[in-house]
Image (cartoon, rainbow, N blue to C red):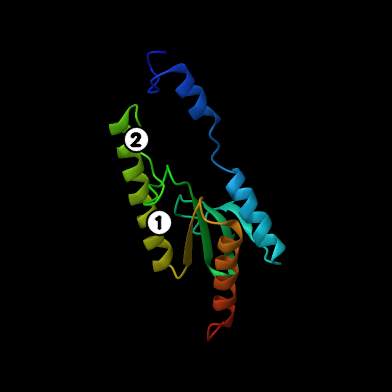
Amino acid sequence: MSEGSWASTIGVRRSMQANTGRDTEPELALRRAVHALGLRYYVNRRPIKAVRRTADLVFPKLKLAVFLDGCFWHGCPEHHTVAKTNAEFWAQKVATNRRRDADTNERLQADGWTVIRIWEHEATIDAAARVAAAVTAIRNAPGT
Protein backbone atom coordinates (compact mmCIF):
# COMPACT_ATOMS: atom_id res chain seq x y z
CA MET A 1 0.00 0.00 0.00
CA SER A 2 1.09 3.56 -0.58
CA GLU A 3 2.27 5.39 2.49
CA GLY A 4 -0.60 7.92 2.57
CA SER A 5 -3.47 5.43 2.26
CA TRP A 6 -5.54 4.39 5.27
CA ALA A 7 -6.72 1.20 3.54
CA SER A 8 -5.32 -2.03 4.92
CA THR A 9 -4.85 -3.67 1.51
CA ILE A 10 -5.00 -2.79 -2.17
CA GLY A 11 -8.22 -4.81 -2.42
CA VAL A 12 -9.83 -2.82 0.39
CA ARG A 13 -8.73 0.41 -1.24
CA ARG A 14 -10.28 -0.60 -4.57
CA SER A 15 -13.46 -1.71 -2.88
CA MET A 16 -13.80 1.58 -1.01
CA GLN A 17 -13.08 3.60 -4.15
CA ALA A 18 -15.90 1.73 -5.91
CA ASN A 19 -18.46 2.88 -3.32
CA THR A 20 -20.54 5.68 -4.74
CA GLY A 21 -22.02 8.57 -2.82
CA ARG A 22 -25.20 8.65 -4.86
CA ASP A 23 -27.30 6.67 -7.32
CA THR A 24 -26.87 3.40 -5.45
CA GLU A 25 -29.21 0.52 -6.27
CA PRO A 26 -31.36 1.10 -3.14
CA GLU A 27 -31.60 4.82 -3.98
CA LEU A 28 -32.58 4.16 -7.58
CA ALA A 29 -35.19 1.61 -6.50
CA LEU A 30 -36.69 4.03 -3.97
CA ARG A 31 -36.76 6.86 -6.51
CA ARG A 32 -38.51 4.63 -9.06
CA ALA A 33 -41.08 3.49 -6.49
CA VAL A 34 -41.81 7.02 -5.23
CA HIS A 35 -42.05 8.30 -8.80
CA ALA A 36 -44.44 5.45 -9.69
CA LEU A 37 -46.73 6.72 -6.92
CA GLY A 38 -46.99 10.00 -8.83
CA LEU A 39 -44.72 11.99 -6.54
CA ARG A 40 -42.11 14.41 -7.87
CA TYR A 41 -39.02 15.42 -5.95
CA TYR A 42 -35.46 16.68 -6.21
CA VAL A 43 -32.53 14.28 -5.94
CA ASN A 44 -29.40 14.77 -3.81
CA ARG A 45 -30.18 18.30 -2.77
CA ARG A 46 -29.51 20.36 0.33
CA PRO A 47 -32.82 21.01 2.06
CA ILE A 48 -31.31 24.09 3.72
CA LYS A 49 -28.74 25.76 1.47
CA ALA A 50 -26.65 27.03 4.40
CA VAL A 51 -26.35 23.55 5.93
CA ARG A 52 -23.92 21.27 4.12
CA ARG A 53 -26.10 18.16 4.27
CA THR A 54 -27.66 16.49 1.26
CA ALA A 55 -30.92 14.54 1.35
CA ASP A 56 -31.59 11.74 -1.13
CA LEU A 57 -35.10 12.99 -1.96
CA VAL A 58 -36.27 16.54 -1.28
CA PHE A 59 -39.77 17.95 -1.51
CA PRO A 60 -38.97 21.66 -0.96
CA LYS A 61 -42.50 23.08 -1.00
CA LEU A 62 -43.57 20.50 1.56
CA LYS A 63 -40.34 20.81 3.56
CA LEU A 64 -39.87 17.04 3.45
CA ALA A 65 -36.40 15.50 3.34
CA VAL A 66 -35.83 11.77 2.81
CA PHE A 67 -32.54 10.06 3.63
CA LEU A 68 -31.76 6.49 2.59
CA ASP A 69 -29.13 5.26 5.04
CA GLY A 70 -26.80 2.33 4.43
CA CYS A 71 -26.83 -0.26 7.19
CA PHE A 72 -23.04 -0.36 7.53
CA TRP A 73 -22.32 3.36 7.13
CA HIS A 74 -25.03 4.59 9.46
CA GLY A 75 -24.94 1.83 12.08
CA CYS A 76 -28.24 0.04 11.54
CA PRO A 77 -29.17 -1.57 14.86
CA GLU A 78 -30.42 -4.62 12.97
CA HIS A 79 -27.79 -5.18 10.27
CA HIS A 80 -24.64 -3.24 11.09
CA THR A 81 -21.58 -5.47 11.16
CA VAL A 82 -18.34 -4.74 12.95
CA ALA A 83 -15.40 -4.36 10.60
CA LYS A 84 -12.78 -7.08 10.98
CA THR A 85 -9.94 -4.90 9.78
CA ASN A 86 -9.30 -1.41 11.12
CA ALA A 87 -12.22 -1.92 13.53
CA GLU A 88 -11.50 1.14 15.66
CA PHE A 89 -11.36 3.43 12.61
CA TRP A 90 -14.68 2.12 11.27
CA ALA A 91 -16.40 2.22 14.66
CA GLN A 92 -15.38 5.87 14.99
CA LYS A 93 -16.50 6.59 11.41
CA VAL A 94 -19.95 5.08 12.00
CA ALA A 95 -20.31 6.89 15.34
CA THR A 96 -19.46 10.17 13.62
CA ASN A 97 -22.02 9.45 10.89
CA ARG A 98 -24.70 8.72 13.50
CA ARG A 99 -23.96 11.98 15.35
CA ARG A 100 -24.10 13.90 12.05
CA ASP A 101 -27.41 12.23 11.16
CA ALA A 102 -28.90 13.25 14.52
CA ASP A 103 -27.58 16.79 14.10
CA THR A 104 -29.03 16.94 10.57
CA ASN A 105 -32.43 15.79 11.84
CA GLU A 106 -32.37 18.45 14.59
CA ARG A 107 -31.34 21.26 12.24
CA LEU A 108 -33.97 20.40 9.67
CA GLN A 109 -36.75 19.93 12.22
CA ALA A 110 -35.84 23.24 13.87
CA ASP A 111 -36.38 24.87 10.46
CA GLY A 112 -39.80 23.21 10.05
CA TRP A 113 -38.78 20.24 7.91
CA THR A 114 -40.13 16.72 8.22
CA VAL A 115 -37.33 14.16 8.07
CA ILE A 116 -37.76 10.55 7.01
CA ARG A 117 -34.88 8.12 7.49
CA ILE A 118 -35.07 4.85 5.59
CA TRP A 119 -32.67 1.95 6.11
CA GLU A 120 -31.34 0.34 2.96
CA HIS A 121 -32.71 -3.04 4.10
CA GLU A 122 -36.30 -1.80 4.22
CA ALA A 123 -38.59 -3.10 1.52
CA THR A 124 -38.71 -0.51 -1.24
CA ILE A 125 -42.49 -0.58 -1.52
CA ASP A 126 -42.85 0.00 2.24
CA ALA A 127 -40.35 2.85 2.17
CA ALA A 128 -42.13 4.48 -0.77
CA ALA A 129 -45.43 4.12 1.07
CA ARG A 130 -43.92 5.91 4.09
CA VAL A 131 -42.83 8.77 1.85
CA ALA A 132 -46.26 8.95 0.20
CA ALA A 133 -48.00 8.91 3.60
CA ALA A 134 -45.80 11.78 4.80
CA VAL A 135 -46.55 13.79 1.64
CA THR A 136 -50.29 13.22 2.14
CA ALA A 137 -50.10 14.14 5.84
CA ILE A 138 -48.22 17.36 5.13
CA ARG A 139 -50.56 18.35 2.29
CA ASN A 140 -53.60 17.68 4.48
CA ALA A 141 -52.24 19.43 7.57
CA PRO A 142 -54.23 22.45 8.73
CA GLY A 143 -52.85 25.67 7.33
CA THR A 144 -51.25 24.17 4.21
Residue drawn at x 59%, y 76% as measured from the top left: 136
Q: Which residue is mark 2?
A: 90
| Residue 106 location, quadrant | bottom left
- Front residue of 88/56: it is 88
Q: Secondary structure at mark 2?
A: helix
Residue drawn at x 45%, y 49% as measured from the top left: 52
Q: Name the amino acid type tagged 2.
A: Trp
Residue drawn at x 42%, y 13% as measured from the top left: 2
Q: Secondary structure at mark 1?
A: helix
x and y percentages locating residue 16 in the rendered image: 48, 29
- Front residue of 35/143: it is 35
Identify the disc placed on residue 104. 1
Residue lying at the far bottom in this picture: please name it: 142
Residue lying at the far top in this picture: please name it: 2
Q: Earlier in the sequence, mark 1 or mark 2?
A: 2
Q: Quadrant of the N terminus?
A: top left
x and y percentages locating residue 124 in the rendered image: 59, 57
CA distance for labels 1 and 2:
21 Å
x and y percentages locating residue 12 in the rendered image: 45, 23
Which callout, 1 or 2, points to the residue nearer the camera? 2
Residue lying at the far left in this picture: please name it: 88
Left or right: 11, with 75 as reference point: right
